[in-house]
Image: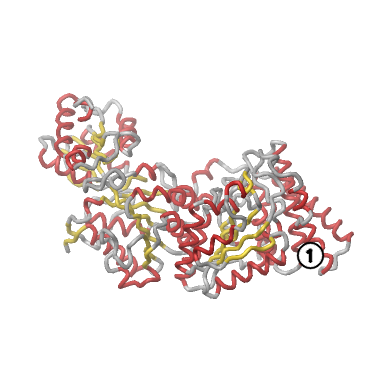
């Protein structure tokens, strides 16, 4: 199996889909001639030409809506939103137009398109280029929301997203773009299916995107036998895999790169609490970012993001007491 | 041939059928107004009284495979394109037999067979969609044309400018039609916009543009045909500004008391129905009594449609769980 960087896995998945399916078109800012600011569209213009691979003006609203319109007329557009924050100016087209097309056409129209967006912190891009913002889209019926964590899932999930007949948000953790991993191009991953990233029997961590790697690192050094689940899909999320794991371990910790309020992990904790009320060995908890914007300073950004040290501290406390420990910002009086 | 397609075919060139369709739209809107006023229908509605010539002119020029992305003020466009009054009214009443199964309502009409994309209730929201449909046709290499219809107010929203620029730079086969009915919701256009002729905004996107008299169907047809021909033959997009007038208020709750005195009357002297009637008499040789008979017939037909739709079934609760995704997923 070839090892490739996550950004190469994405470019390879795009190229493989474009070779297989002539209706796939790709457009976004600086993605054609410049091959993408993160080089996730390397080689596409050269191989597929300017009809199918296009640079757009800096007009997210127009090109997101154009993707919706093209999708209703038989194309499969894959668009790139350079930083997830830039989706803000295009949300109408996604949430109010694209996500409603099937419903408001009485099932006559499909919107088979993918919105790729780079997300997350860790690279010093500051308060307007470091958020994950999954909750902007996770609460809109009609959208599917995925996030890969490594080269394999980037490749396999992106191909699944492009093949899907619905509107899929594909949120790429920017910090992973340069990371290498083996990729089996024949391996299929399904939307709505989580992966057990590391098996264990005493405690379940549910994580997403780059937090899967944080959870793995924590699990590798923990004295607790941790099972790490890489959720992969937030909507529709894989209840079966999560429930089976928690049924076995009796303990749930969600690790989220997201301010505490309104995160997707609340859904997981609520569903697990309702399903296993009275059977859990400890309070189900979330480890999140604090409710503040992403700080620029390197030391502060590292504290802002959940990290293996904090994850292991929380897990040790939870194992010892069964009760939800306080997050670091409360312990330290902030 | 479906009823909708037959209705579309009927208005392609016959001046009598075009006049009849305009009368149908007028009757339809008046009935809808009354049904909302009496509380028979819930929610809100946006009437297109006075804008019938644009709707019929547009529908008579387009092919049925040319999609139209229009707005929440589109009962007229939908009927002109061929949607049946039963399908439109049942939708507005929220009935299972409506074109969207009762899940859309007055602002969300749709019929893909006739090229009517789901109408958007967001100002300017349909413009990028039309450009995207045109993008699909360009990539597919066919000669279909997409159309966006929007109001004067939309020329102040970002989607308008972004879409014009994108369509121009990609030379997309799309026609932008600004239905300038003088009022953007409750505000006269001069209060919010520093220019009178909105079409000149296309100048900065190097796009052909012109205004036309939206009350006169022949002028409408000629102006739209020329833009459609350009788009179909690879000449790219056009911005057309149709000068019309909204005879009613913005929506159900609006009495439109803010209008300058005499403005409505002055526009009503050029009511598209009067012009269409004159034309039908002149070219179609309709007599005075033919007109009276036709109007009486249309009134009866629409009354019968109201009764039919009132008796139509309500949608079942199950239908609101359908058509979210391609395959139902329990969450």
Q: Quadrant of residue B78?
A: bottom right
Position of residue B107 measured from the top left corner of the image (x, y, whole percent): 60, 48
Please indicate, yes or no, whether residue A197 appears anywhere in the rendered image: yes
User: Where is mark 1, residue-wise?
Assistant: B16
Relative to A263, does residue B132 appear above or below in the rendering? below
Q: Is residue A107 left or right of residue B91?
A: left
**Residue A185 placement: quadrant:** bottom left
Residue lying furthest front: B194
> In which chain is the residue bearing label 1?
B
Q: What is the x, y in percent for residue A281? A: 22, 28
Q: Is residue B183 left or right of residue B282?
A: left
Could you tell me which quadrant the C terminus of chain B lies in? top left
Looking at the picture, tell me which residue is in the foreground, A300 or B24.
A300
Task: Tell me which corner region of the image, top left, top right, bottom left or bottom right, holds residue B212.
Answer: bottom right
Q: Quadrant of the N terminus of chain B?
A: bottom right
- B313 or B253: nearer the viewer: B253
Q: Is residue B97 above or below residue A56?
A: above
Residue B67, visible in the rendered structure: no
**Residue A302 location (% of width, % of height):** 18, 40
Count the numbered circles shown: 1
Horizontal side of residue A117 vs B8, given as left or right = left
Does residue B280 sit above or below A277 in this rendering?
below
Q: Nearer the viewer, residue A73 or A83?
A: A83
Residue A263 placement (x, y as % from top left): 33, 37
Residue at the outermost bottom position? B233
Classify mark 1: residues with Cα within 10 Å, few (<14), some (14-19) or many (20+): many
Secondary structure under the numbered disc 1 in the rendered image? helix
């Amino acid at each position: 199996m070839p090892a490739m960087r996550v950004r190469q896995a994405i470019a390879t998945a795009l190229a493989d889909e474009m070779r297989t399916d002539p209706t796939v078109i790709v457009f976004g800012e600086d993605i054609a001639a410049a091959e993408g600011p993160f080089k996730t569209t390397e080689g596409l213009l050269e191989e597929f030409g300017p009809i199918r691979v296009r640079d757009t003006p800096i007009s997210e609203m127009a090109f997101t809506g154009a993707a919706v319109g093209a999708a209703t007329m038989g194309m499969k557009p894959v668009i790139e939103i350079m930083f997830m924050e830039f989706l803000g100016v295009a949300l109408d087209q996604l949430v109010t137009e694209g996500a409603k097309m099937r419903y408001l056409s009485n099932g006559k129209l499909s919107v088979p398109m993918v919105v790729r967006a780079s997300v997350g912190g860790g690279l010093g891009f500051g308060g307007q280029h470091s958020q994950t913002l999954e909750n902007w889209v996770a609460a809109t019926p009609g959208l599917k929301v995925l996030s890969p964590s490594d080269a394999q899932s980037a490749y396999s999930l992106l191909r699944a997203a492009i093949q899907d007949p619905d509107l899929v948000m594909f949120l790429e953790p920017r910090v992973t773009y340069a990371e290498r991993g083996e990729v089996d191009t024949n391996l299929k991953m399904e939307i709505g299916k989580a992966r057990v990233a590391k098996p264990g029997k005493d405690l379940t961590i549910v994580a997403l995107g780059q937090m899967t790697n944080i959870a793995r690192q924590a699990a590798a050094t923990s004295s607790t036998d941790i099972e790490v689940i890489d959720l992969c899909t937030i909507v529709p999320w894989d209840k079966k895999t999560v429930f089976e794991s928690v049924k076995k371990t009796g303990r749930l910790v969600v690790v989220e790169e997201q301010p505490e309020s309104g995160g997707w992990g609340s859904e997981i904790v609520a569903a697990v609490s309702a399903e296993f009320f009275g059977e859990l060995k400890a309070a189900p908890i979330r480890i999140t970012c604090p409710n503040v914007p992403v700080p620029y300073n390197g030391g502060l950004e590292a504290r802002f993001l959940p990290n293996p040290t904090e994850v292991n501290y929380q897990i040790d406390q939870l194992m010892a007491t069964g009760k939800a420990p306080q997050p670091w910002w409360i312990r330290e009086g902030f | 041939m479906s009823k909708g397609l037959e209705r579309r075919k009927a208005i392609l060139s016959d001046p009598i059928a075009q006049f009849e369709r305009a009368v149908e739209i007028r009757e339809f809107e008046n009935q809808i107004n009354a049904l909302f006023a009496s509380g028979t229908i819930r929610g809100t509605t946006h009437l297109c009284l006075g804008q019938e010539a644009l709707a019929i002119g547009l529908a008579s020029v387009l092919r049925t495979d040319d999609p139209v992305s229009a707005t929440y003020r589109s009962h007229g466009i939908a009927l002109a394109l061929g949607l049946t009054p039963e399908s439109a009214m049942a939708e507005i009443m929220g009935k299972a037999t409506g074109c969207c199964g009762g899940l859309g309502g007055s602002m969300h009409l749709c019929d893909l067979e006739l090229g009517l994309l789901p109408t958007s209730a967001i100002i300017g929201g349909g413009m990028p969609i039309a450009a995207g449909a045109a993008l699909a046709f360009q990539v597919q290499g066919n000669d279909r044309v997409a159309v966006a219809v929007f109001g004067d107010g939309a020329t102040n929203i970002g989607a308008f400018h972004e879409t014009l620029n994108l369509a121009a730079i990609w030379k997309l086969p799309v026609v932008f039609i600004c239905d300038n009915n003088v009022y953007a919701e409750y505000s006269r256009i001069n209060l919010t916009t520093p220019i009178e002729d909105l079409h000149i905004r296309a100048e900065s996107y190097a796009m052909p543009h012109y205004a036309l008299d939206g009350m006169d169907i022949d002028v409408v047809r000629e102006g739209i045909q020329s833009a459609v021909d350009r788009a179909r033959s690879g000449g790219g997009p056009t911005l057309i500004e149709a000068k019309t007038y909204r005879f009613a208020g913005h929506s159900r709750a609006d009495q439109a008391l803010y209008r300058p005195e005499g403005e409505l009357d002055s526009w009503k002297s050029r009511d598209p129905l009067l012009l269409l009637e004159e034309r039908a008499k002149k070219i179609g040789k309709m007599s005075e009594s033919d007109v009276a008979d036709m109007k009486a017939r249309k009134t009866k037909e629409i009354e019968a449609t109201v009764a039919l739709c009132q008796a139509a079934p309500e949608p079942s609760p199950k239908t609101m769980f359908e058509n979210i995704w391609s395959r139902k997923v329990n969450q």
